[in-house]
Structures are given as structure tokens and as C-alpha cells.
């Protein structure tokens, strides 16, 4: 019997070797049986697993009967993301609440509908009595995503209708979670910063008259102050991360768990667990660390030749984390351009000017241009490569003085809207549990007595 950690460590390599030996499947069998690894075919195209009216991604078009890459486009309920954000900017207003209404209910709200919905979200920005003290601040962790997941699962205990999966009840729960996600994330960070880093503790209540972006900055900063541009850029970041076509890992998780008939809190906890993975929601942190490494190791970051050669070293696994990846470059769907990155870039530049970070923006812009060149020169790729939304988001969060521990949680604060919309759509159309098929490679074996093994 393994009694201590030391006992387990002595057996660890033995256990590891058994797992590797007995679980490894020869890659040739995936091809032989037509299994799409990662639900992607040889050309990187996703296996169709559902239908949705919520959003659409456009990355190719038909020219002379052939599928060719095109400039990326993203539509929320049929509206081009460029046009939506242009509308908010032209009217000089925040768009998070309006976009959330659109994704949840399918139409853009009129003024009266938007006002009522915004008030509903504001009213929902309340946690149960003593919840911050008893749940959020208890056992604080550097992993804020785990802290949010813990809080979401605990909230089920405070909801007398937690298991009710009727459309009206799930709408109520969704709006509540949209409202309190910024609170849970920021309070969890402050608890960690106070108890683990010995910093001062700030718990600011949200202002019911402010937008999600304004309240996030208000609750995060000790003095509760922020500029209009800071809040507007964060608002745009939240909108751009709110939803993405339904084919991403965490949204697929949302629909899979929803199809089992599970409750909202369990579904959202599963989606959070998916998003926190470094292959999904943690990419922007890797971009920031890569840029810091480039600054440290390149003598002149304005010299394109030097920067390009260092990017080549990164690609050859000779620099940074030795994984051979230029982070923030490329996307599973987009090739020529990621529309979210295109939208973001203009506002990032404005914020960089306000923050006097023009040199940083210039470096990012250079890498955005040189990265695809290096990849094209060094790698045989089936489609083009461009900067994705994660490339600039880390720079934005840094300029907003948002700590790295909150980068992925901010993604969650935005994506809870998309998850909620997909959960509702799955509930409306659901008639079967999702049960993917696996080809078993297991051969029949005869039982062997324990003394003969």
C-alpha cells in the first residue's frame, strides 16, 4: 500500500511507463480508420458537430469552383463584428451589454430593451451574503480560473432552482453569471494579492450605473479611477472575445455537457476548465512572455534584421521556451487575417499613445509583419499565417495595468456570454446526448491468476 508521497514517488516512473506503454496508439491507425485527430482533418478543417445561428466565421470563399483563403470575417447573429463595433464607437458608447443581448436573444435591442437589460445585469451584480468572505477569500490561489470555477460550483448551493433547466430559468442564471463574473474574478485576485503577496486588500462594489468594462477597472484599481479610452478599449476586448463560431473547445464543452441534461453551474464550470488550458485561453500570456524574451535577447529591437533572426531561432527551438512556436501567430480557422486582431489593432495604437508605449506597439507591429514571413520561409504550411486576437490582447491588458493572473479570467468574463447563448441554443434543439464514437484498439485477453503474472 502506498502510504506517503515518498512511496508514490518511488513508483512514479513505473506507473508512468505502464501508462505510456499501454495507452499509446500508433499514429497510422488514425489514418487507417479515418479518425480525425483533434476533430480536424488533414487540411486543418474542423469536423462538423453541430449547427448554430449564434455566430459565423468566414475564412474562405469559392473562386472558379475552388475554395481559396480570404480575409477573415466574424459575424454575431449575422452582424459583421466590424460594423457592430463601429456603431458603438460612432455613438461613443459601451457595447458589452448590447452585444450580450444580441447573442442571447438573437436581435439588436432598441433603446428601451437595452436599458431594461442593462438594469437587469446591474441588479444581478450581487453575491450572496458573506460569499466573498466565506468562498472567494477562503484558500486564495494564484490560479484565478480555479477560484472562479470553485465559486461558480458553490453558487449552485445558494440557488433553490439550480437544477431547473427550463429556458426561463437558464436565462436568469446566465444573466446572473454574466453580471457577477467580473466581481468573482477581481475579488479572487485581490484575495490572492493580499493573503499570498502581503499586499493591501481592496474590495470595491460595482456601480450599477457603469458598464461591465468600467466596473471591471473600477473594482480592480485601488483608487477606482480609469480614463474613458481605457474603459472603451477594454469594452472592445470583451466584445471581441465574447463568442467565436461555436467550434472552439470551451463552447463545444458547453454544448456537450448541456446535452447530458446537466445544470447551468456544472456546465459553466466545465467550460471554465476547458478555457483555462494553455492551448485555449492562455495564449496571450505566452505572447507577453515571448515579447519580454525578445526584448531581453535582441540588442536593437528596432532592427528588423535582428528581430527576424531571433524569431527564426524561436521557430527552430533555439530560443524562448524551445517549443518552436511564435505565439500569437496563426489560427485553426483564419489564414489571411483574424478580424478580431484587425479590429483591435487600431484601438491598441490609440491606447499605446495615451500610455506612452509607442515603442512597444512598434515592436508588436514589426513582429506581426515579420512573424508570418519567417514561418512561411521555414515551414511547409497548408495555409497562410496571420496574427490572431491573442497577439495584441496581452499588450492591451498590460497597458491597462491588469495583472497577468487575470488575463485568462478576462477571456472568461467575455466568453460567459457566448457559452450562455450556446447553452440556450442547445437546450432549445436538444433531443439526444452527444456521444462521440471511438474505434477500440483493445484485443481480447485471457485472465491470468495473480500468482502467474
Image: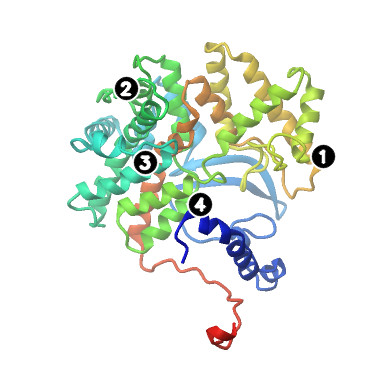
- Mark nearer the N terminus (4 vs 3): 3
- Mark nearer the N terminus (1 vs 2): 2
Q: Looking at the image, which is closer to me, 176 or 186? A: 186
> Which of labels 3 and 1 is toward the front?
3
Q: Quadrant of the C terminus?
A: bottom right
> Which of labels 1 and 2 is toward the front?
2
Crowd around label 4: few <14 · some 14–19 · many ≥20 (10 Å): some
Q: Along the horizontal axis of the image, is 421 left or right of 252?
A: left
Q: Which mark is residue 377?
A: 1
In which image quadrant can residue 337 be found? top right
- On the image, the x and y values in percent for residue 300 come to 76, 17
- Mark nearer the N terminus (2 vs 3): 3
- On the image, the x and y values in percent for residue 82 come to 51, 32
What residue lies at 70% left-to-right and 68% top-to-bottom?
26
Q: Which mark is residue 249?
A: 4
SS for callout 4: helix
Q: Measure how far apart labels 3 and 1 are at the Cα level.
A: 42 Å
Q: Which mark is residue 148?
A: 3
Q: Measure how far apart labels 4 and 3 are at the Cα level.
A: 18 Å
Q: Which residue is mark 2?
A: 202
What residue lies at 33% left-to-right and 30% top-to-bottom?
187
Amino acid at each position: 500500500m502506498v502510504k506517503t508521497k515518498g512511496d508514490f514517488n518511488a513508483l512514479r516512473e513505473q506507473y508512468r511507463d505502464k501508462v505510456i506503454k499501454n495507452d499509446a496508439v500508433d499514429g497510422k491507425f488514425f489514418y487507417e480508420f479515418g479518425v480525425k485527430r483533434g476533430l480536424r482533418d488533414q487540411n486543418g478543417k474542423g469536423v462538423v458537430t453541430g449547427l448554430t445561428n449564434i455566430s459565423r466565421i468566414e475564412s474562405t470563399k469559392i473562386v472558379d469552383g475552388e475554395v481559396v483563403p480570404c480575409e477573415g470575417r466574424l459575424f454575431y447573429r449575422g452582424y459583421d463584428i466590424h460594423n457592430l463595433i463601429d456603431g458603438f464607437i460612432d455613438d461613443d458608447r459601451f457595447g458589452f451589454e448590447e452585444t450580450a443581448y444580441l447573442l442571447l436573444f438573437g436581435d439588436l435591442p432598441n433603446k428601451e430593451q437595452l436599458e431594461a437589460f442593462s438594469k437587469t445585469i446591474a441588479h444581478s451584480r450581487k453575491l450572496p451574503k458573506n460569499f466573498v468572505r466565506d468562498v472567494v477569500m477562503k484558500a486564495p490561489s494564484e490560479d484565478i480560473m480555479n477560484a472562479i470555477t470553485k465559486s461558480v460550483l458553490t453558487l449552485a448551493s445558494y440557488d433553490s432552482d439550480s437544477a431547473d433547466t427550463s429556458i426561463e430559468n437558464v436565462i436568469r442564471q446566465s444573466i446572473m453569471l454574466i453580471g457577477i463574473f467580473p466581481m468573482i474574478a477581481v475579488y479572487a485576485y485581490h484575495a490572492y494579492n493580499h493573503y499570498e503577496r502581503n499586499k493591501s486588500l481592496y474590495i470595491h462594489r460595482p456601480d450599477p450605473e457603469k458598464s461591465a468594462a468600467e466596473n471591471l477597472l473600477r473594482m480592480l484599481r485601488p483608487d477606482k479611477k480609469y480614463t474613458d479610452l481605457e474603459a472603451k478599449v477594454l469594452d472592445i476586448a470583451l466584445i471581441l472575445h465574447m463568442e467565436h463560431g461555436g467550434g472552439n473547445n470551451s463552447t463545444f464543452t458547453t454544448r456537450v455537457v448541456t446535452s447530458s441534461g446537466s445544470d447551468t453551474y456544472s456546465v459553466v464550470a466545465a467550460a471554465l476548465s476547458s478555457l483555462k488550458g494553455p492551448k485555449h485561453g492562455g495564449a496571450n500570456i505566452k505572447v507577453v512572455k515571448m515579447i519580454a524574451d525578445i526584448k531581453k535577447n535582441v540588442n536593437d529591437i528596432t532592427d528588423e534584421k535582428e528581430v527576424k533572426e531571433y524569431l527564426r531561432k524561436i521557430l527552430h527551438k533555439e530560443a524562448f521556451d524551445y517549443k518552436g512556436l511564435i505565439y500569437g501567430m496563426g489560427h485553426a480557422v483564419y489564414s489571411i487575417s483574424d478580424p478580431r486582431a484587425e479590429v483591435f489593432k487600431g484601438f491598441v495604437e490609440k491606447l499605446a499613445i495615451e500610455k506612452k508605449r509607442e515603442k512597444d506597439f512598434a515592436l508588436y507591429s514589426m513582429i506581426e509583419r515579420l512573424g508570418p514571413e519567417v514561418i512561411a520561409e521555414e515551414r511547409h504550411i497548408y495555409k497562410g499565417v496571420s496574427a490572431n486576437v491573442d497577439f495584441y490582447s496581452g499588450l492591451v491588458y498590460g497597458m491597462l495595468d491588469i495583472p497577468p493572473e487575470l488575463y485568462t479570467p478576462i477571456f472568461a468574463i467575455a466568453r460567459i456570454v457566448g457559452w450562455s447563448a450556446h447553452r440556450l441554443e442547445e437546450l432549445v434543439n436538444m433531443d439526444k446526448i452527444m456521444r462521440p464514437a471511438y474505434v477500440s484498439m483493445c484485443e481480447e485477453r485471457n485472465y491470468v491468476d495473480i500468482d502467474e503474472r
